[in-house]
Image (cartoon, coloured by chain):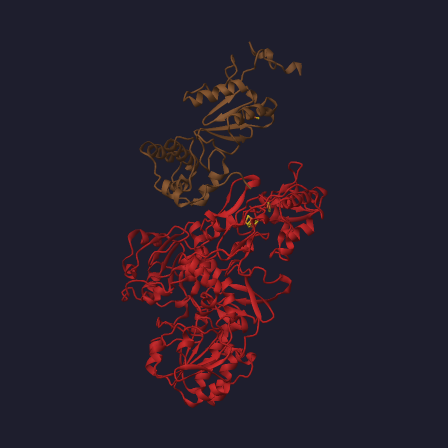
Chain colours: A brown, B red
Amino acid sequence: MAARHLEPDTPELRARWGNFAWNAENAEKAKEVLARYPVGRQRSAVMPLLDLAQRQVGAETNTQGWLPIPVMEYVAAYLDMPIIRVVEVASFYTMYNLVPVGRYHVQVCGTTPCMLRGSDDIMAACKKRGMHKGHTTDDGMWTLTEVECMGNCASAPMVQINDDNYEDLTVESFDKVLDALAKGETPKPGTQLPGRHTVEPVGEPTSLAAMVKENHDYRGEW
Amino acid sequence: MPKLTVDGIEVEVPAGATVLQACEAAGKEIPRFCYHERLSIAGNCRMCLVEVKPGPPKPQASCALPAGEGQEIRTDSEMVRKAREGVMEFLLINHPLDCPICDQGGECDLQDQSVAYGRGASRYDENKRAVTEKYMGPLIKTVMTRCIHCTRCVRFSEEIAGVDEIGALYRGENMQITTYLERAAKHELSANVIDLCPVGALTSRPYAFEARPWELKKTLSIDVSDAVGSNIRIDSRGREALRILPRVNDDVNEEWLSDKARFQVDGLTRRRLDRVWIRKQGKLQQASWEDAFAAIAKAKPGASIAAIAGDMLDCETMFAAKVLLKASGSSLIESRQTGMDYAVSSLAAVNFNSTFAGIETADAILIVGSHVRWEAPLVNVRLRKAAKNGAKIFIVGPEWETTYPATFLGADVSVLSKLPGDVSDAFKDAKRPAIILGGAGLAAGAHDAALALAVKFKMVTPEWNGFNVLHMAAARMGALMLGFAQQGGIKDLVAAKPAVLLALGADEVDFSAFEGSLKVYIGHHGDKAAHAADIVLPASAFTEKAGTYVNTEGRVQFADKAVFAPGDAREDWTILRALADALGVTVGFDSFAELQAAMIAEVPALGIEGLADYGSDLPKGDAKADLGGEIRYPIKDFYLTNPIARASETMQRCSSELLHGVEFAEAAE
Ligand code: SF4
Ligand code: FES
Ligand code: FES
């Protein structure tokens, strides 16, 4: 039923991840994260630590990273909390990947504003490159997921790839982003519309226009 | 103390009460699924919606809303009616409506409340969601499509049991209740989630498809699997007790029951002694009652007769045996089967004086030689509450997995004479210090030392009695009240070399010490004692006779008879009455009522339900008493502590699967 599921707990999985432990750098980071929470409340650190663990898995596998069961158990033991509580958190938040993903996790927003601005075309462009929803391409490069609103509606349509958002996409600009990523380059995140910087109005301001140059009291006009 | 009105009725409720509680105080029924008095408030089912003024013009969840001064609550308005119908309709959207094949049918909150508050017909014709079954062990059967996500089971395992093992994975429509990786729920109270689950998602696995609730005769009884004396209801059909459920008694078991008390019931139909057996040429052979009584009479015991009472006996049986022996001129009666010989001159010194409800309020607790989780799981629940209220808990004995923070002080009982500084400090500062001495502590000779500690740390004051002995046998306190204790314990019986030894349901005795005696076993299961006995007389199990039981707090409770004993088996007292005739002595009772009256005349406290008064004068103890060294817990296997449980397939499976890690292939269903 649910598309989201835990990767089965097999002997192979145990063999691969059973010895998971923080690497030197992350051990430091984990300590730093723990220190942010009051004594006795360290369990609150479960979210940043799961993220850290996912990134370490990502670094080891050259993907975005995911959370194998033994890794979640490691985090549970690290925080001295029941494993079921850790799995509850990891399975609730979709930013934790519960199954292996590819080098790039392409999350296409399909909610209404993005849909009205052309997310169907973006999705089609993904499919053309051989991606399917919920799958990783054979070369291990791309995992495609359709997601709900990411809060970038003012620069719709948008796609989130690993840690960056790419906005104001057209099929052409999206292709460029993917090509750059495939070549190992780092395309500029954010809006892909030439001349736009963030989500400022495109062209002339259409609302609160009188506020552009100076403060303006609109109250008399209402 | 806010005052408010509910449907025009004015009520005053304690500060901190919820609107739901206020409505109940006003006598209004509020439908609910997730709310439960003994669990934290979740507020996630929305069935308890009411109209509240002042407040936003929309229905509000009464279980999670504090009652406030001057609120006007309506539970009977159009808004409330529609809100309930709406919630019910949503809950049923993804519910399979498979009541005809669901074991909860007839005792299902969802069924009842949808009849009472629902719309009557569904408007939903989309696909429903389906959820795979989740394995939760040999006791809990799951049909997770029926789950309405009230999270009661999750809250129970986290809050009451203290073993986080059930959780809600994923979110929204995909939410699923499961144990981690579908491993079996592994604690002694796991099956209580079956009662808590308001729908048929979690039902009893051993009882699956056995009966409908309306076919069952319900009998009020007392559990005998440990010394807690949990109040139970025996559901029977015809001659068979089909299941056991807890009854609410806030002083004893609240509304929980240990898995053993609940599921040993199938042991009542297996390995039963339903015929008379006599050993001839080393082999037990079937015989008649007459033969058996003649054989006993032939031994001509006269005063040379002794009786040992087992762990699950009712007081009436023990008293009948005592009278029989007395009439024969003997007083060789003992109940501490394993040979313990602690002093019983003061019953208060062998009683759980704080009471179970009281121990929750203790602020420093020293447990000496008790694996509380296994010996009295429901007392462990109380200890967990005490720990949550800030009590410091220390344990002397081999380590076990506690469900609360506790410090182990080592397995050697001699630590009592030189408690570490921080422990003494904790007890010196405590307002309600308590000690709990378990069977293993008694066996290690810690009784005097414990009494001395009670004096040292002022555990007994006019308002508080913190000295507790935690027994394991349901019969123990009753037996001690009836005088079933010799100064030297069983050793005295052995030394007396009785011609006839009556073993009344006593299976844990080392019978090899009674070589020369004619061993007569009066009991209900073909267990250890029947193998050693010369004559076996089939008697009744606790479900098959009425009787009085006294729990480890000294609480006198009465149990009714649910079903008849199988085959030739008789109620225990009738066997002893007939034996009196065979031995040619008079015991002075011919009916159960006469027997009971005679017992109450001798020990009046057994006639009054409730706590018996043993006074609060404790012997001073002896701080320099010789301490017996290493503590060894007597229970090696929680699920197999008595003959009924050992005969139970369910308990055997729990033992091998949950304690010994044997895997069972799931039968295809
Ligand atoms: S399984 Fe039962 S108790 Fe647990 S959340 Fe579902 S409905 Fe509630
Ligand atoms: S709808 Fe796509 S980001 Fe909001
Ligand atoms: S009982 Fe109030 S929301 Fe469930």
Query: How many dots with numbers?
Result: 0
| Quarter the C terminus of chain B occupies | bottom right
Residue at x 62%, y 43% (from the top left corner)? B128
Residue B635 in view (yes/no): yes
Above or below B71: residue B629: below
Ligand 2 position by quadrant: top right
Q: B116 or B41, which is in the foreground? A: B116
Above or below B627: residue A25: above
Above or below B635: residue B508: below
Specify the quadrant of the image occupied by residue B194: bottom right
Residue at x 60%, y 56% (from the top left corner)? B104
> In the displayed structure, does residue B93 sit left or right of residue A179?
right
x, y percentage for residue A211?
58, 12
Residue B12 in view (yes/no): no
x, y percentage for residue B84?
67, 45
Specify the quadrant of the image occupied by residue B526: bottom left
Q: B455 or B136, which is in the foreground? A: B136
> In the displayed structure, does residue B339 sit left or right of residue B535?
left
x, y percentage for residue B560?
56, 71
Q: Residue furthest top?
A: A213
> In the displayed structure, does residue A207 sit left or right of residue B473?
right
x, y percentage for residue B262?
51, 62
